[in-house]
Image: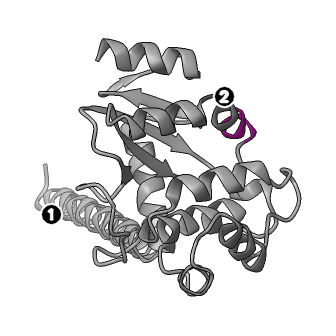
Amino acid sequence: MSKRVGQKQAARVVREQLARERRRRRTAWVSGIAVVTLVAAGLVGFAVFSAQRPKGNFAVPATATADRAGLTVGSGPVTVELYLDYLCPACRAFEQDAGATLERLVADKRITLVYHPVAILDRYSTNAYSSRSAAGAGCAADAGKLTEYTEALYADQPAEGGPGHSDEQLVNLAAGASLPQDEFGQCLRENRYADWVTHVTDAMSARGVNGTPTVFVDGRQLPRPTAQTLTAAVDQG
């Protein structure tokens, strides 16, 4: 092989190596841009998500549980937890069937009743009724009238698919249930417990609860919550 041919082959090898190196750098550069873009998008998405979540110092009703995800009524040895949405027709049916039973069990100091007012049905009203009425539950709890508030709202439940009660209507219903009108009205109108409702609803989802009414007795879920099954579960507890 002549010296000139050898030089040409060597030059070709060098060119091929340089070309491979350029392709490698180009691939790395494109991949780097893609990674940076994805990270940036993720950070933006997380920032948006975080902005929608309640902050750690949101207002909490005075009777809230330790995890801030429920409202306590009574002080009996058996814990009964009730997840409810004030727009939920099945929750209204449960209230009509078991409401008096729950009140009796609380009065007899047999149970500690924990309400979890959640907002999962806002899409079925035109004015976020689930969220606003659930926030009102916190206001009612502060007044020591959560049971009365719940009974009043289910006795006059708005239909799904239309406007729920306005704030003024909620205030009037609460006043009719012996809640202090001025204090309750101020609490409701200023959305004092709006972030708290979001927290309660998030905690419900984290627990794996996906519907209302859902009832737990000492941590055991009732398959079919009725006054009869509730009483039987409390007796066993």
- Locate residue 29: give its quadrant: bottom left
The foreground one among 207 and 172 is 172
Number of numbered tags placed on the structure image = 2
Mark 1 and mark 2 residues within 8 Å of each other at the beta carbon: no
In this picture, residue 109 sits left or right of residue 3: right
> Observer-nearest residue: 87 or 203?
87
Q: Residue at x 44, y 13 (%)?
A: 232
Which secondary structure lies at badge 2? helix
Of the residues under marks 1 and 2, which one precedes in the sequence? 1
Q: Which mark is residue 86?
A: none
Amino acid carrying mark 1 in the image: Gln
Q: Nearer the viewer, residue 6 or 127?
A: 127
Residue segment shown in magenta:
89-93
On the question of residue 41 being in view, the answer is yes
**Residue 166 covered by magenta stretch:** no
Q: Label 2: how many residues lie within 10 Å, few (<14), some (14-19) or many (20+)?
A: some
Mark 1–mark 2 Cα distance, whole angstroms, equals 97 Å
**Image check: 6 left or right of 154?**
left
Residue 17 location (% of width, % of height): 20, 60
Q: At label 2, which amino acid type do we have?
A: Asp
State which quadrant residue 10 falls in. Answer: bottom left
Instruction: Give the residue pinned by disc 2.
Output: 97
At 23% across and 56% down in the image, what residue appears? 66
Locate the C terminus by quadrant.
top left
